Amino acid sequence: MAIIVCPQPAAAEIGLEVMRRGGNAVDAAVTCAFVQGVLDPQMCGIGGCGVMLVHGPKSGDALLEFYATAGSRAREDQWEHLFIRQAADRYGYVLDGWVNDVGYQSVGVPGTVAGLAEALTRYGTITWAQAIEPAIPLARDGFPVTGFMHGYWTTDYGPDVVPNRERIQVTPAAKAIYLNGDKLFEIGELFVQADLARTLERLANEGPEAFYKGEISDRIAADFAANGGFVTKEDLATYRVNVTEPLRGTYRGLSVMAAGPPAAGITLLQMLNFLEGFDIGSHGWPSTEAARVLVEAMAWAVADRDLHVADPRFVDVPTGALADKGYAAKAREVAAVAVGAGAAVHDRPDTTHVCAVDDSGNVVSLTHTLGSASGVVTPGLGFGYNDYMNCFDPRPGNPNSVRPGKTRATSMTPTLIFDGDRLRVCNPAGARQRPRPRHDAGRGGERAADRLPGRRGAAGGPHTPGCGSRSGAARVHRQQADAQLRLVLRPAPGDRR
């Protein structure tokens, strides 16, 4: 019994094939991630970063953090004079000239290659080359432009970010990829990424070191030095993945495991702690009262995130105090929250996710991203870089102010939720992701979550989101809030409704 879930159907099917051939959940997730980087090159890719949550009956639980970090040329006060305002959706800051949103200065040291390599080395069974191989022909031979991809290119996400049509043409090398002549590729036209295919082939043959210490790193460093970027060859050579324990909490008797700071797992736990004091399931969904309580929980937790959550290597994050259920109880007592303040909020379609479960009970929840994508492509390499610098606070002295080697707060929240030994939820990506189709590829007739070793079978049991989906089905999820609420609206023990 195996299942894999992600927004790109072809990537999910390729990941499932890895498990059909004997690979485990980590093998499938890593392979899937490389394919996602080809199929959705504005959402993720080898120029990006991410975080992976791994659960295994034998290996235990681990969190692999491979966030992008500020390059050594960055300075805390470098953008202070360019600051205009915080973005309306609280995702990033608006600066004069958009220097933190697009272009070379917006790029942090990429972590995806190192992160996927670390996961495969620690927990995988296939080789590095085998994990990359399925992505290469998709890049070399091309695939038809999808409606989602074209929609991203042409949609304006509001006044606080560079329009995507301009974003994907920031550098000549990017323009050469995304324009067919002098126009954007149309839906259905063949989209070929020949330079990316050659880069992936080099990575497959030479290993992840090629990205950080080999010819690829030489070309990256030279390009950034020539164009005023902050990333240096030394930054690439010294990049390291952080492997740590996940953050843990509970919700109505369920065990919650998530990514701790600088990720938004602590914010998720605060929301759940707040909601635990309300019988919101009795209101049903959709309903005005349930929505009101959810908004209050989100507003309170996100306000704390803005004040406290940052890179714990640089800032003392009061994780224990924030996650304390007594703190949430006090917040409920004074929950007269004014939400929105009339500001227009524009959802952003960035970031992607993959969740995989294998026959042996190994589970992976992986979120990886380019941020909002920088529009930068190094000539001849064929992949886009993150714009991870966009959420650093340009004002010195704040928790998320810029420092060399530092990463910033992120909404990425890979999460696993268990009911005893039984997997109930393998969650989707960060809360800022726009709802989109998500493909479930699986084999067998029962839900993967119900067939994990030591878990009681419940083929006819209640549906739960993420990896608890019925296998073998490709389906389109409802709006994201609806999917997220299935757990929240679950009756508390002893409730009758």
Image (cartoon, rainbow, N blue to C red):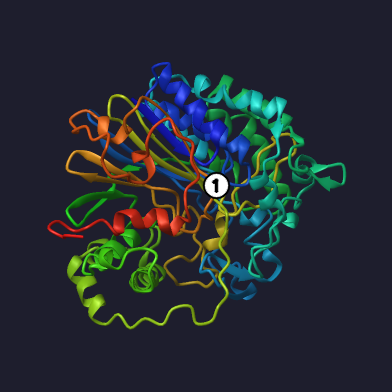
Tell me what residue is drawn at x 60 percent, y 67 percent: 78
Nearer to me, 307 or 338: 338
The count of marks equals 1
Mark 1 crowdedness (10 Å alpha carbons): few <14, some 14-19, many ≥20: many
Tell me what residue is drawn at x 65 percent, y 67 percent: 158
Tell me what residue is drawn at x 38 percent, y 67 percent: 305
Residue carrying label 1: 109
Residue 84's place in the image compared with 418, above or below, is: below
- Residue 417, given in percent of the width and then of the height, sits at 27, 47
- Residue 358, given in percent of the width and then of the height, sits at 34, 27
- Residue 61, given in percent of the width and then of the height, sits at 26, 38
Residue 16's place in the image compared with 50, above or below, is: above
Q: Which quadrant is the N terminus positioned in?
A: top left
* Left or right side of 123 for 274: left
Residue 215's place in the image compared with 155, above or below, is: above
* Left or right side of 451 for 372: right
> Which type of secondary structure does the marked residue at label 1 adopt?
loop
Amino acid beneath label 1: Val
Q: Which quadrant is the C terminus positioned in?
A: bottom left
Nearer to me, 423 or 67: 423
Nearer to me, 46 or 407: 46
Q: Is residue 328 visible?
A: yes
- Residue 428, given in percent of the width and then of the height, sits at 42, 48
